[in-house]
Amino acid sequence: MKDLPVSAKVVVIGGGIVGCSTAYHLAKLGCEVVLLEQARLTSGTTFHAAGLVGQLRSNANVTQLLGYSVELYRTLEAETGLATGWKMNGGLRLACNKERWTEVKRQATTAHSFGLDMQLLTPAEALNLWPLMNTGDVIGAAFLPTDGQANPSDITQALARGARASGAEIFEDTQVLGVTVGKNGIEAVETSRGTICCEKVVCCAGQWTREFAARVGVNVPLVSVQHQYMLTGTIPGVTADLPTLRDPDRLTYYKEEVGGLVMGGYEPNPIPWAVDGIPEGFSYSLLDSDFDHFEPMLELSLGRVPALAEADIKQLTNGPESFTPDGNFILGESPELANFYIGAGFNAFGIASGGGAGMALAEWVYKGEPPYDLWSVDIRRFGRPHFDTDWVRERTLEAYTKHYTMAWPSEEHSSARPCRRSPLYQILKEQGACFGEKLGWERPNWFADLKAGELPEDIYSFEQPNWYEAVAREHKAAREAAVLIDQTSFAKYLLKGPDALQALNWISANNIDKPVGSLTYTQMLDDNGGIQCDVTVARTAVNEFYIVTGTGFAIHDYNWISRNIPETLNAQLFDVTSSTCVLSLMGPNSRDILQCVTRADISSEVFPFGSLQTIGIGGCPVNALRITYIGELGWELHFPVEYAQTVYETLMRAGRERGLVNAGYRMIESCRLEKGYRAWGSDIGPDHTPLDAGLGWAVKLKNSNTPFKGREAITRQQQAGLKKKLACFTVKDPDVVLLGRETIYRNGTRVGWLSSGGYGHHLNCAIGYGYIRNESGVTDEYIRSGSYQLEVATQLVDCQVHLKALYDNTNQRIRA
């Protein structure tokens, strides 16, 4: 047996498809890489994967990543000489009711937005592609010709051969016992065959990843769930070119296999596995077939494929796989330990993702950043609740059951709730709050009129939802009177130290060097000029700054700020989220209400926009930030959590005669669309610069003497000109619902898609934002000179384009 090397730049742990793909791509980049597998390649979960390869996801970049998998699998056999079982036989998706057909049509539009040729078919056309099925209940179908299937073990072995050919070393039967971490970070991996010194570790250990990563303090939220599919003998009429078939209304999927069919699905009562840990020596192992549990899936399938009733069932495979709380896989550098990377939790679509995930992870490891924005699969999207395995398991089982259920707009999870609660949770609940959840926090989305008999429950729809009127009431109050919003879930940090100003001014694109008591809205950029964070900074002392960001970005933004503080500077970052409550008082009557409860002078002359003061309310010291995200006069009130009920009740009493009402996050979304405020994760992110997004005013380019991270990239872009720019689109047709991902056409040519969409209740129209793209350059004149349409659920609708805010009640500039 070949000896282990003494050292390597990178050690990849895990010899499944993702680990082998990562090693393959690292070796192609010229990186010295060693892959270690505790048993044999593919012996964990890869060997029993079903092997369907679909591309379309709700995120453009994840769709691009899966598209890369397809392109890699098409050429891998020719490159390595090993068969992969890849065939591009296309993928068919059925719709059997009105709501599903609407969903499929919107998915087709999403595909068109992302450059995929998804075709809508009649039941007869679908039957022509898949002659074995009963189409009696089928309304329509969608077909993506470039989808396909592969043999998971073969494709993994081909990736391994390609990795070796490029210089990677692969060692099987080598168990990794631990990772040695010194004062400067990762030093080595300890194995059953010795030690390998290394600089970076990539953990692609599948369902073993959570336990292994925890040994070095890294949290990976995934758990094992049983997943079954059956394999039949030869069935007359099953041809080698039969497309893969997904039948979500019957929760099942199908693919051809040696003249027979593989049929599996996602049952509504999944069974967790290895609750007390994965058994020792679990390799090339399957669980006992559970025919009783699988029987309901089989019954559903018989209604679609009657031939299964007579087919010979050769095998019922029960193989555990790793699933995650949100149904997306996990990639990236861990926030807890530098140079420790994760590629795991692939939710039974690891074969479809493997090629692209390995490519992205390899670039992340080698270059320090992914090839494009991968926030939707970034490990930093998780947070505090995800440390508890029981919480992770409960939420993950719900996500599993939703794999084929309707993907409703604005749908919330119902499991593992409530978890994190504001001190005002019970009070708001009693007043009709319908809560949503983000990163474990319960947040009021909207308020039902309990006296009128409204129930605070979401009823989902692709048309106007049941909360439409409630949000309209809150929106009206925000524009004409005042609203109070519990935003305690904001992530909040303190940056302290003698070099805090210098550090933060380096990380921030905007100028932070302002007097104590100033607020600054700023992006934080990477070296490409991409927007990594979108925050508000309050200067609370000469050497202290209070930073506020969105709830879901708590771990991501903390990680970005802390790791970009230059090593030579003395500044420390603290997370103070849990100690501080936030109530946002917004609307034209907000000053009158606030003045009733404080002795402080809050006139515009004394308390201007973009400033903060400490004021007293009901015996509580309140840090009042004059800022807004809805386009109205207002304050964010930040104070210790023990004062929450007192401050809330004091404000509500004072506001009763001035029209003050509770409001929620769906009202905020409606107002911010009218005002044109950007949202990180949709309208802005690492793929977009401030210039692309119309936020150049928040970048300190005029001061040539002030360096900041990303400055050179922004300067180059300013000189070269833009190739995309964010614009606003409105549709007058009241029946059109914009949700995001609708395709943008300029003069009949596809130029982009909506990054966000919704309804502006004050303006009474659908509103969307999206980037208009043109490789030859995008200017304001280019945008204005075009005629625009949006593709909504495959239908073209006329729209108007706008470059300025639709609603401009003030001249205030605010946090996006």
Image (cartoon, rainbow, N blue to C red):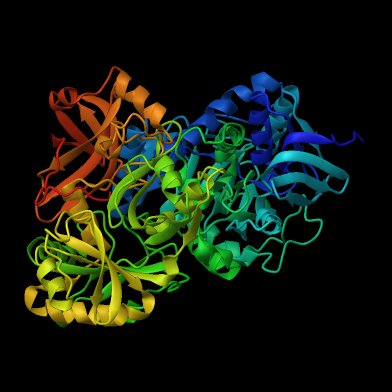
| 347 with respect to 582 (left or right) | right
Q: Which residue is depicted at the point 59% across and 46% down? A: 262
Question: Compared to 526, does 379 lie above or below?
Answer: below
Q: Can you tell which quarter of the image residue 241 is in?
A: top right
User: Is residue 84 visible from the viewing direction of this image?
Assistant: no
| 198 with respect to 352 (left or right) | right
The x and y percentages for residue 791 are 23, 36
The x and y percentages for residue 49 are 64, 46
User: Is residue 277 visible from the viewing direction of this image?
Assistant: yes
Q: Can you tell which quarter of the image residue 605 is in?
A: bottom left
| 13 with respect to 777 (left or right) | right
For the N terminus, the quadrant is top right
The x and y percentages for residue 258 are 65, 36
Q: Which residue is depicted at the point 30% across and 37% down? A: 699
The x and y percentages for residue 476 are 10, 63
Question: Compared to 270, does 545 lie above or below?
Answer: above
Question: Compared to 257, does 496 lie above or below?
Answer: below
Q: Can you tell which quarter of the image residue 657 is in?
A: bottom left
Question: Compared to 308, does 656 lie above or below?
Answer: below
Frontmost residue, 360 versus 112 = 360
Which residue lies most toward the right here? 1
Label total for image: 0
Frontmost residue, 271 versus 787 = 787
Frontmost residue, 221 versus 468 = 221
Frontmost residue, 445 versus 236 = 445
